[in-house]
Image: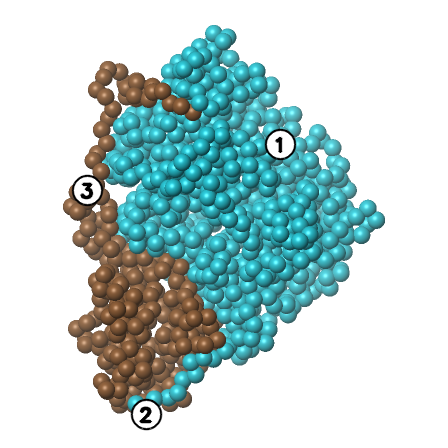
């Protein structure tokens, strides 16, 4: 023992610790960054932070390798070879900014809509959106259209909120938790943290997912459903609950539009709309006064079933009657849906019984007094402790909008919205159903370089709100808010390049992209996308998309296809704002927002994109970015904007520490020391709600008064859940030729079919058009927990965990097909084929194959060795996913949900077969290696990161 | 050969980890956080060879494996995520096999460490360890292994609540616990007792200090112990008319808005 060495147990390997917000994925956890001589040495979670409470995932800890990645761009680049060649010359920033200003200015003067400005998963949409409004182009959106708009839109239209950023389960009190279509992404640390606690408390967790990985692996019950059939499964649950009388009628009468009378007059123009009084209030039948009264009045005995006569003699029925009749149909009975879903009828019946038991036999009551919207005091807050969470597995299907709506309606029927143990909103949600925000940008053919009247993205409530020309043709380049995708609340970023290249609906001049790898894993049909970016006009020889400006921090697959590269910083080198105006980090009991601060200075000639955008705005003379004398409004760049920009008087990007004394929350004069105060507080601010504001926010007087004061809501009235969604019927009526809006004939049938005011299930469109025996299997992807949203740069540590992907096949199905572990197989869709290596597993639905998303890289991209496993064995399914659906009626729609335009990634249908003996060894399709960009050095062979000096030797 | 501290020399303290296989979701947070701390800590550096190349191989002190295992609870089988690192055995073969004394078990807390000054990289220890917990760092020619973050757990520069291994500090699912397994009253010992924590390969006789908590029984609703499961739902009424008609009769109540 005497020989035992002395170990230094208290080394100090840092000389400073700075707080900021993680950006290794979209979850926005608080982090503490340890620094030594200006080098990042360690990153850990911030215990005080509302999102992660101290924990940190593998991505967050690997942030060091992202920050010091050899794929970081070094200086602005101008393309000198053909697109795709990777031939660039380095520019000084002044030259780059001057060039961008020239291109953008010429385009704006010609016709502002010829700029398409789309950003990826950035967190500065309130800035980028404002910039696009001032520029005057209608063609702006972020990545939501190819991510999870169905979840957001269906929730906002139905309950004024949704999952993740909009709300979450009441983790503390819930007694039964259902997880739909959630792999390992979105809300990742909060989910992991709370799943662990639920298991400790003995709360049952049910995961509905074709794949049993990650969260599904630790669930009590895994329901290995067939992709795209979750709507049928949920409908089966609703059927059982209705049939047995296990729905909360009081809750429905009080908080939903159950009693609102729907006009039943098939020949009239208002069939299926709500009967309304002279003040436009929906009507219901009051059993006490035996008369029709405003359904918004409190204390009435509102009938939710029956048939009533309107004053004009026409018939009307309550919305709930229509909904219940719809779901009581035998086609939604468990026995009827079992075959399609692959879920035994007994399982559906049992889960329905468990839901009913938890909701109605295990009601909880908290000693919290609150006042409802009608001023009635309640001594206690009661709740039905069933909660749910759903994400991309539900939304990324062409039937996702309706399925998401069904999940929200299931919660409403059980009486679990914003109650103890149920789903809870996070401020600024709930909002109206839908929020009072219409898409702006409709213009009568003028080409003026003027700002738009308001934000680009919103929530149409009828055909009048669409951005279409008189002929019905789309006004936006992505065709959002047109008859092809009327409720495209997040736009259709996945269609921009395709549409622009085809000049459909019109050509553009400048494509301006930020932080979206559209040349690879963010596009369907990668080859066609690259062709669209490189096609030229045979007459002029010019590219059909003449100019592409791109800002990225890394040498991604998209960089070689752009003309002008504006290199961004890493997330540890810049200011950012997680704003209440955009997507804040609130929790159910608090409103919270956050910042990023630069914890280290860039060692390259790069600039934060937000600074660059603000400067371009000033150079272009855009209102709100330049003063009348031409000087910049925010000479201090993004931090200047964060502190001093006001959306309306007293309301700015950051809600905390406002006012001259820094004491105001939400509304107050700009405080020059605001950022310092955020930094002192760990780079976030959290305003806790009072106890009487915490629950039933949709109908809570005290909460709503506060929400109005904060500017989150226009009015403090009750938010009524929309079981029956009238805006859908308005579109449907238009398609039936009723009303004044003309629907182009080619779209009529589609609108009529899919715009059902009640949630419906239909077969995913690609399966319907190209399923069948030839393509008998579903193919889906999931986000790996250690890589979700962090594939950018191909991190030295994370790539050792996920350096390649496999095609996972159900063991029994694989054996039937003669496929063994490690076999190379062809995955063929109606659109193309991919070759990959198979692995067998039991925990996957037998009709489904799956793989990790975005692991495959183009050879040479991200400054990896062209022989990297990401390129030789890693693969994308994107190559076999078409951006367009097969032709029907002479037209090819985008591969999207017909209601919202959500990219239908998971509708993919394939067949698989073993590759031949001479086809072994590498994935296909093969792409030409990407040339290393100007200024990038060959990546180091070995990394021995000690924090003392930069890795590499 | 290297000798272990004698019973008299040992303090009785057995610092180690308790890993909960019931809540581990296999996210790799512990592995990366470990790598991040230890590449600049006692084990610095944990080299990544060919880091951006065709065959990247780095030294990690903790790795996660996922398995599908058969169970008896009525479901087909289950997926288990299994984090693997040094178990700081009471009778560690990796120490006794070490020809230079570089591998040793600390008397004061039971942590098994490698002294990089005297390790000759002969790899005997990795052959001797049945748990595969040791990793050879080719760039430095020495063995690296979990130190239980010996440079964190006593580190006076860290806040007291942060004086725990990096993997425990980071784990989002709360699946990792750290403490003194030599003290029957410690939180980790109680947890092991409560949840039936077990040793890996107990028959080998190395007496690992780290314990694993088995997955809890799943409440699928189909297993016999679910007798208290709610009764199947029954359709309303027995009156005439369709399902919908019967439902409408039931729902036709006086409901106050």
Q: CA distance from mark 2 to mark 3?
A: 61 Å
Q: Residue at x 39, y 30 (%)?
A: A251
Mark 1 Cα within 10 Å, few/some/many (few <14, many 20+)?
many
Q: Give the farthest residue toward the bottom.
A: A2
Q: Chain of mark 1?
A: A
Q: Chain of mark 3?
A: B
Question: Where is residue A302, by image quadrant?
Answer: top left
Q: Residue A710 location in percent, x, y?
A: 59, 42
Mark 3 Cα within 10 Å, few/some/many (few <14, many 20+)?
few
Mark 2 and 3 residues: CB-CB less than 8 Å, in contact? no
Mark 1 and 3 residues: CB-CB less than 8 Å, in contact? no
Asked if residue A752 can be seen in this view, the reply is no
The residue labelled by disc 1 is A467
Q: Residue A9 location in percent, x, y?
A: 42, 80
The residue labelled by disc 2 is A2
Report the side of A153 relative to B250 (left or right).
right
Instruction: Tell which of A675 and A660 is nearer to you.
Output: A660
Depth-wise, is mark 1 or mark 3 nearer the camera?
Answer: 3
């Amino acid at each position: 023992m005497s020989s035992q060495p002395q170990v230094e147990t208290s080394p100090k390997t840092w000389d400073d610790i700075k707080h900021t917000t993680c950006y290794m994925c979209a979850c926005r956890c608080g982090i503490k960054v340890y620094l030594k001589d200006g080098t990042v040495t360690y990153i850990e979670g911030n215990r005080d932070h509302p999102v992660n409470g101290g924990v940190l995932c593998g991505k967050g800890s690997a942030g060091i390798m992202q920050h010091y990645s050899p794929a970081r761009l070094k200086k602005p680049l101008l393309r000198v070879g053909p697109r795709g060649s990777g031939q660039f010359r380095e520019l000084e920033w002044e030259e780059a900014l001057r060039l961008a200003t020239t291109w953008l200015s010429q385009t704006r003067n010609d016709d502002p809509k010829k700029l398409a400005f789309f950003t990826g998963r950035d967190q500065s949409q309130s800035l980028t959106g404002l910039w696009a409004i001032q520029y005057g182009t209608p063609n702006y959106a972020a990545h939501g259209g190819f991510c999870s708009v169905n979840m957001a839109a269906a929730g906002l239209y139905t309950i004024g909120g949704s999952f993740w950023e909009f709300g979450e389960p009441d983790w503390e009190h819930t007694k039964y938790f259902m997880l739909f279509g959630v792999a390992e992404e979105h809300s990742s640390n909060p989910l992991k943290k709370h799943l662990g606690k639920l298991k400790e408390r003995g709360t049952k967790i049910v995961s509905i997912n074709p794949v049993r990985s990650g969260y599904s692996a630790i669930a009590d019950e895994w329901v290995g459903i067939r992709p795209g059939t979750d709507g049928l499964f949920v409908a089966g649950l609703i059927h059982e609950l209705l049939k047995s009388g296990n729905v909360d009628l009081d809750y429905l009468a009080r908080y939903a539009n159950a009693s609102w009378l729907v006009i039943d007059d098939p020949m009239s123009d208002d069939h299926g709309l709500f009967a309304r009084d002279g003040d436009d209030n929906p009507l219901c039948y009051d059993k006490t006064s035996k008369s029709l009264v405003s359904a918004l009045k409190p204390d009435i005995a509102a009938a939710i079933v029956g048939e009533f006569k309107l004053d004009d003699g026409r018939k009307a029925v309550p919305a709930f009657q229509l909904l219940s009749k719809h779901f009581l149909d035998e086609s939604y009975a468990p026995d009827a849906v079992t075959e399609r879903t692959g879920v035994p009828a007994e399982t559906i019946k049992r889960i329905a019984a468990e839901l009913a038991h938890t909701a109605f036999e295990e009601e909880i009551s908290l000693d919290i007094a609150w006042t409802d919207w009608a001023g009635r005091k309640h001594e206690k807050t009661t709740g039905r402790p069933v909660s749910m969470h759903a994400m991309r597995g539900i939304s990324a299907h062409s039937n996702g909008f309706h399925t998401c709506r069904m999940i929200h309606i299931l919660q409403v029927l059980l009486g679990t919205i914003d109650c103890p143990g149920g789903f809870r909103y996070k401020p600024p949600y709930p909002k109206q159903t839908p929020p009072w925000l219409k898409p702006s940008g409709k213009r009568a053919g003028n080409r003026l370089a003027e700002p738009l009247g308001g934000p680009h993205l919103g929530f149409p409530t009828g055909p009048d709100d669409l951005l279409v020309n008189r002929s019905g043709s789309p006004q936006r380049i992505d065709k959002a808010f047109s008859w092809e995708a009327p409720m495209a609340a997040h736009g259709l970023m996945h269609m921009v390049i395709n549409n622009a290249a085809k000049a459909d609906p019109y050509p553009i001049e400048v494509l301006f992209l930020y932080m979206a790898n559209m040349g690879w894993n963010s596009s369907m049909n990668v080859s066609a996308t690259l062709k669209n970016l490189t096609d030229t006009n045979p007459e002029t020889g010019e590219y059909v998309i003449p100019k592409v400006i791109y800002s990225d921090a890394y040498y991604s697959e998209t960089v070689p296809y752009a003309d002008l590269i504006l290199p961004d910083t890493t997330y540890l080198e810049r200011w950012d704002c997680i704003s209440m105006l955009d997507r804040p980090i609130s929790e159910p009991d608090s409103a919270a927002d956050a910042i990023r601060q630069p914890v280290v200075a860039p060692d390259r000639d790069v600039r934060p994109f937000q600074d660059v955008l603000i400067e371009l705005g000033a150079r272009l003379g855009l209102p709100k970015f330049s003063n009348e004398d031409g000087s910049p409004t925010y000479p201090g760049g993004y931090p200047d904007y964060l502190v001093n920009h006001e959306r309306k008087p007293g309301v700015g990007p950051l809600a905390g520490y406002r006012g001259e004394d820094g004491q105001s929350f939400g509304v107050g004069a700009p405080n020059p020391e605001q950022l310092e105060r955020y930094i002192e507080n760990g780079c976030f601010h959290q305003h806790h709600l009072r106890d009487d504001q915490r629950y039933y926010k949709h109908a809570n007087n005290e909460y709503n008064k506060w929400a109005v004061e904060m500017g989150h809501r226009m009015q403090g009235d009750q938010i009524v859940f929309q079981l029956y969604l009238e805006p859908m019927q308005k579109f449907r009526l238009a398609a039936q030729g009723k009303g004044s809006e003309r629907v182009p004939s080619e779209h009529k049938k589609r609108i009529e079919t899919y715009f059902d005011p009640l949630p419906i299930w239909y077969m995913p469109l690609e399966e319907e058009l190209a399923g069948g025996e030839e393509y008998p299997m579903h193919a889906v992807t999931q986000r790996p927990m250690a890589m979700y949203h962090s594939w950018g740069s191909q991190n030295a540590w994370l790539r050792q965990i996920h350096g390649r992907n496999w095609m996972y096949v159900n063991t029994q199905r694989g054996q039937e097909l003669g496929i063994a572990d490690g076999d190379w197989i062809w995955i063929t869709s109606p659109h193309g084929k991919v070759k990959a290596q198979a692995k067998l597993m039991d925990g996957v639905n037998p009709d489904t194959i799956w793989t990790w998303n975005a692991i495959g890289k183009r050879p040479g991209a991200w400054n990896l060795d062209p022989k990297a496993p990401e390129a030789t064995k890693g693969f994308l399914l994107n190559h076999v996913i078409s951006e367009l659906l097969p032709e029907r009626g002479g037209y090819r729609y985008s591969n999207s949900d017909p209601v919202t335009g959500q990219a239908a990634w998971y509708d993919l249908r394939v067949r698989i077969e073993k590759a031949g003996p001479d086809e072994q060894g590498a994935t296909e399709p093969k792409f030409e290696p990407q040339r290393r960009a100007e200024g990038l050095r060959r990546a180091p062979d070995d990394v021995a990161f000690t924090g003392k000096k930069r890795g590499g030797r | 050969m290297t000798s272990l501290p004698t019973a008299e020399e040992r303090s009785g303290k057995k610092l180690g980890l308790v890993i909960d296989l019931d809540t581990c979701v296999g996210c790799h947070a512990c592995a990366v956080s470990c790598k991040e701390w230890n590449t600049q800590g006692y084990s610095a550096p944990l080299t990544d060879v060919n880091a951006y190349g065709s065959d990247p191989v780095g030294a990690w002190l903790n790795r996660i494996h996922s398995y599908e295992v058969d169970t008896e609870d009525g479901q087909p089988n289950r997926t288990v995520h299994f984090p693997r690192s040094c178990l700081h055995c009471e009778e560690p073969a990796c120490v006794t096999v070490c020809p230079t004394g570089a591998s040793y078990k600390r008397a004061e807390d039971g942590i098994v460490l490698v002294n990089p000054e005297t390790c000759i990289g002969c790899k005997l220890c990795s052959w001797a360890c049945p748990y595969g917990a040791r990793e050879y760092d080719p760039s430095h020619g020495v063995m690296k292994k979990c130190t239980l973050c010996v440079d964190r757990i006593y580190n006076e520069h860290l806040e007291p609540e942060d004086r725990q291994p990096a993997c425990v500090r980071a784990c989002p699912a709360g699946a990792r616990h750290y403490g003194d397994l030599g003290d029957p009253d410690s939180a980790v010992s109680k947890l092991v007792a409560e949840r039936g924590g077990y040793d890996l390969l107990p028959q080998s006789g190395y007496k690992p200090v780290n314990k694993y908590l088995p997955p809890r029984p799943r409440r699928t609703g189909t297993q016999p112990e679910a007798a208290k499961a709610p009764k199947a739902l029954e359709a309303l009424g027995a009156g005439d008319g369709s399902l919908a008609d019967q439902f409408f009769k039931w729902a036709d109540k006086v409901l106050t808005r």
